[in-house]
Amino acid sequence: MELDLRGLSFSFGEKQVLRDVSFKVHPGEFLGLMGPNGSGKTTLLRCLMNFLPAGSESISVDGRPLDAFSPAELARTFAVVPQSSATDFSFTAYDIVMMGRIPHVSSRIAGTTKEDASAVRSAMERTDTWKFASRPFYGLSGGERQKVIVARALAQQSKALLLDEPTVYLDINGQFEVMDLIKRLNREEGTTVIAVLHDVNLAARYCSRIALLSHGMLEAIGPPKEVLTPEIIQSVYGVDVVVRRDPFTEAVYVVPHTISSLGHAHGTHAHLLCGGGTGGPIMKALVERGFSVSAGVLNVLDSDYENVQDLHLAVVAEAPFAPISEGAYAENMRFIEDSKVVIVSPFPVGPGNIRNLEAARAALRAGKLVMIVSPAPGKTIDFVGGKADAAVKDLISSGAIPVKDVHELVSKLPMEGTG
Amino acid sequence: MMSRTPKASDGGPDADLQHVVRRRKLILGLLLLGLIGSVLLALLIGTLGPIGPGNPERISFGDAMGAIFNLPGDRPDYYNVIFWEVRIPRVLLAGLVGAALACAGTAMQAVFRNPMADPFIVGVSSGASLGAVIAGLSGIASVAVIGSFVSPALAFFTALVTVFVVYSLGNVRGKLYVDTLLLSGVAVAAFLGAIVSFLIYFRSQEYHRIIFWLLGSLSLASWTAVGVLAVAVSIGTVVVFLYSRDLNALLLGEETAHNLGSDPETVKTLMLVFAAVMTSAGVAFTGVIGFVGLIVPHMMRIVVGADHRILVPSATLTGAIFLILADALARSVIAPTELPVGIITALCGGPFFLYLLRRSRTGGET
């Protein structure tokens, strides 16, 4: 099924909900429709179903304009899985799936045909819902109900599935069950899927393309990694995010920045000696309180290096897995000289990065304020045979201020202008 | 619901589903037999009947059957009159009105997606009451021969006008909003009810007649009434039945119905029109008989499930049986005086309904 949208616009009275949306959906695609609340996703779906009349020329299916379709033809073209389905009336799961055969009924007098029965049975077996076919629909769990609705959509034997946030009311297990089922149908049976999804990561994981709507306009369309970039998400949703890559599926996933400004940006320079991810919470606390933060020396690929990148901080970097070189050490010292305070995170110490502790000692000698976060005498993560522990003790005895955690750290930090 | 979940589920869903199909056929068969049985029973019950007070004389069972089936035999001529001019039309009318109310109630509960909806929800009863009161007060109803036609005709007319007004109020730019329709129905019914009360308040001699009419009675049964109802009910129930799949879909919401290839606007309008015509025709001849249209669909939904392909025929048959038996009771409990049948339907229907409701909510679930 080839779906073609050309300049689709729709208004509720004065309020224009969709403006000039154009894109194509190809056979066998899994297209995610995304966008903030009120961006027009659900309206677009309703226009596709002709539940809202969008005008004659803007939507065509396989080259045929949508308003040439009768209601039954339309239901044989698209099957809809809504957000949730509930009814107080005592239908069995089987009754509900049988309703998917309504667009195939040849006449009102006709009873259930063999084709109807076998379509329903096959749909329920493929969705693993046959086992509760005779149970009342309202007694099923949310996830089971949603799978029954997917079965109904399959019994409809339509060319494409339209999903309207099909997992929004499901727990995490139900979400994956339903989405995996739909993905399997898409992959194994070539069913075209168009899904309104709220969850960016669910979309990134399952969709082959994503169409991103904003204020009723098509903002971007393409594969998830092209559409789900921090820049586009910032411009559409107005939130800062970090885009990562799932190590197992290679799918991109998006994590919101949790950094929020808690004070004015006074720009006091703090330099952070860290590594192994121990610096993340400290960076966050410092950035939130308006410090200008730099970090070093970090190996590229170290998780603190990624943290620094995500926060766009200045960093002294070393090649992956390489020990700190003379050049990197010297650059690190220049950052320390510029800084008002040097902070040491409880990073694991090995032969490659022990020079970061030497840098802290040098900072003390140069009269810098040095603070050590949660030093644990005797318990420093030490891969250098006790040298790290000794170095930490030496730092404290030479005047570095130990603080037990990030909270104590920020309470004791000096700020420019306040002292 | 419990009654649809078969006890023996060892055979898995296949056995369960076959069981459901067999059960549906069985229930329809039993209801057909029940209808025939209750017609015969109701014909035999009554003053002078083989069953009943038998005062001042008792018609023997053989004579009664002979009169009913027009068999040759040695019996007084007026036996035939009793059965063919009075009792048979009355029993048939009871069955037709019961069927009309139950079928219309089923359709209305689906259209409003609300099990508390009944055939009178769009103002049929208040509209018909106004027509009947006007006929009574203006004296037309008392005119010989014509009166017995004019009064139902006027009630039928005012009922349909009322439904049309309520329908128009619920219709906004070609779309029928059921919540607006519901509230319009309530408001219009209250308004017309006030007018009816106002009219009868100043004509207290009409009071008894009106109350009798408001509680419903089959004592004015005639072959004319049977004929009119037979046409209305056969067309109405067939239309509702032909749309059973659409009613199923409608219960899941209008958007879902649309997405399943049904056309909710057409379905809602057709159901309202045919339910209103059936109900108005019934009300015009028998007054407002409550509870049948509310309870019977609900009761049958507990027994056969919500699928309208079985629910519509079984509720229609049950409505007929229920009203035939209720009327038989109404004319024999304190014979020779008759009770308004509405009192019987409420007295029997209410507690039985509550029993089913409790049973379906509390136990028996396999």
Image (cartoon, grey):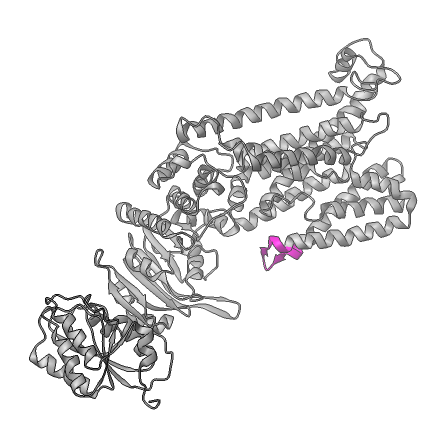
Q: Which residues are magenta?
A: B168-180
* Residue B176 falls inside the magenta stretch: yes
> In this image, B32 relative to B249: left or right?
right
| Above or below: residue B358 compared with residue B259 | above
What residue lies at 80% left-to-right and 19% top-to-bottom? Answer: B52
What residue lies at 23% left-to-right and 74% top-to-bottom? Answer: A308
> In this image, B348 relative to A40: left or right?
right
| Above or below: residue A59 compared with residue B216 | below
Q: Where is residue B134 shown, x and y percent of the image?
A: 84, 47
> In this image, A96 relative to A200: left or right?
right
Viewer-closest of A341 and A200 = A341
The image quarter containing residue B322 is top right
- Mark yes or no: residue A335 visible: no
The image quarter containing residue B98 is top right
Q: Where is residue B248 shown, x and y percent of the image?
A: 52, 42
Residue sitting at the far left = A326
| Above or below: residue B267 compared with residue A22 | above
The quarter of the rendered structure image containing the C terminus of chain A is bottom left
Residue sitting at the far top = B74
Q: Where is residue B78 shown, x and y percent of the image?
A: 85, 18
- Mark yes or no: residue B332 visible: yes
Residue sitting at the far bottom = A417
What residue lies at 41% left-to-right and 50% top-to-bottom? Answer: A81
Viewer-closest of B121 and B301 = B301
Q: Where is residue A357 shown, x and y percent of the image?
A: 15, 76
